[in-house]
Amino acid sequence: MRVAILSASAGWHVDELCAALRARGHEVAVASYEGLVASMGRSRDRHSSLSSEQASLLDADVVLPRIIPHGSLEQIIFRVNALHWVESRGTLVMNSPRAIERSVDKFYASALIEEAGLLVPETVVCERPEDALAATRTMGDVIFKPLFGSMGRGMVRVSDPDMAFRVARGLEELRAVFYVQRVIAHQGRDIRAFVIGGRVIGAIERLAPSGDWRTNVARGGTARPVDLPAAWTDAAIRAAAAVGTDYAGVDLLPALDGRLYVLEVNGIPGWQGLQDATGIPVATAIVEHMETVPVRRVNNASVRA
């Protein structure tokens, strides 16, 4: 198949996907979101087109979106709607733009996960700083998280009312949406389960570095492989399904009281820490799943069966 990888930049994950695709006989091109050029309405004998870096996305059989770079609201909407257009023409986009939109928004993802019958930490999402501060007073020990974000960046843990006031006012200046979440008592670890095609292919236990409460490997946390109990595996699979991902990194938090919380579903996940800890060739597993999705050609467009 002809596969296009859309990414903010080249890097380890793109290299892994390229190697896995070529090893299984697929053609692969890497293109940037910033290079997207859409053309339409030119003439009867010239079809609409969408390209980037000489890669024609409408002629690809599969598009694999990776990290969407920061940009203005117009730029982000254009990039995601370009993926919607590609998908509407019959090309397999994995993960789908709908799943990316759901998973990147912590508010909507949390709502969908809870509606699927899974536990999420007590959370308040609002626009007014006074509502965020009221939530902080009620919950006591909280984490302010960016609505869009990953790898632990931008998170602030607050229990002091004066500090909460400063954080809230600073975020107000940025016109941010407040995502305020109660801190769950735990043992300094969480779980990253990697779900592909409705099954967990592997999982790691992430331990916070000394003096920190964040377990993200990208922030110095350590990872080791872990076998999940059946209930935890089921929770990860259900959470990934709730936001509609073909593959995802699902973050689980075992609490001291024995309950299991779902923290996040990452629809454009990294996997270097998981692969280093487990030895599982994740990119190969993603490509193998991609190959199982039936496609058929209609008027030179690939259509999901």
Image: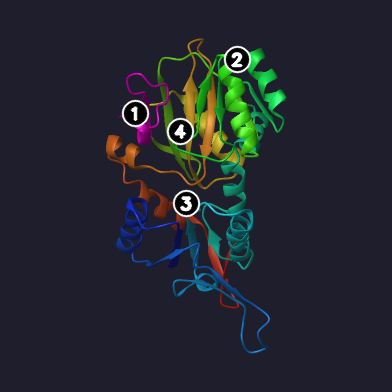
Q: Residue at x 38, y 22 (%)?
A: 212
**Mark with earlier residue (3, 1):** 3
The answer to whether the residues at label 3 and label 4 have Cβ atoms under 8 Å apart is no
From the top left corner, tell me how far across and down residue 295 is, in percent.
54, 64
What distance separates the C-alpha of mark 3 from that of mark 1?
Answer: 22 Å
- Of marks 4 and 2, the one in the foreground: 2
Q: Nearer the viewer, mark 2 or mark 1?
A: 2
| Alpha carbon distance from label 3 to label 4 | 16 Å
Residue drawn where x is 66% and y is 33% of the image: 111
Residue in the image at 52% along x and 44% along y: 267
| Separation of marks 2 and 3 at Cα, in angstroms | 36 Å
Reply above or below: 200 against 72. above
Q: Indicate the amino acid at tag 4.
A: Gly
Q: Quadrant of residue 85?
A: bottom right
Give coordinates of residue 189: x percent, y percent.
Answer: 40, 21
Question: What SS does tag 4 mark?
Answer: loop
* C-beta proximity under 8 Å, tags 3 and 1: no
- Within 10 Å of the Cα at label 3, are there few (<14), some (14-19), or many (20+) other Cα atoms? some
Q: Which SS class for mark 2?
A: helix
Q: Which residue is mark 4?
A: 152
Q: Which residue is mark 3?
A: 67
- Left or right: 277, with 87 as reference point: left
Q: Residue beneath label 1, please?
A: 221
Residue at label 2? 161
Residue located farthest toward the top when viewing the structure as drawn: 257
Q: Kindly identify the amino acid type of the residue bearing the numbered disc 1.
A: Gly
Is 301 on the left-hand or right-hand side of 282?
Answer: right
Give the CA distance from mark 2 to mark 1: 28 Å
* First reached walking from the N terminus: tag 4 or tag 2: 4
**Of callouts 3 and 4, which one flags the residue occurring earlier in the amino acid sequence?**
3
Near-viewer residue (164 or 38): 164
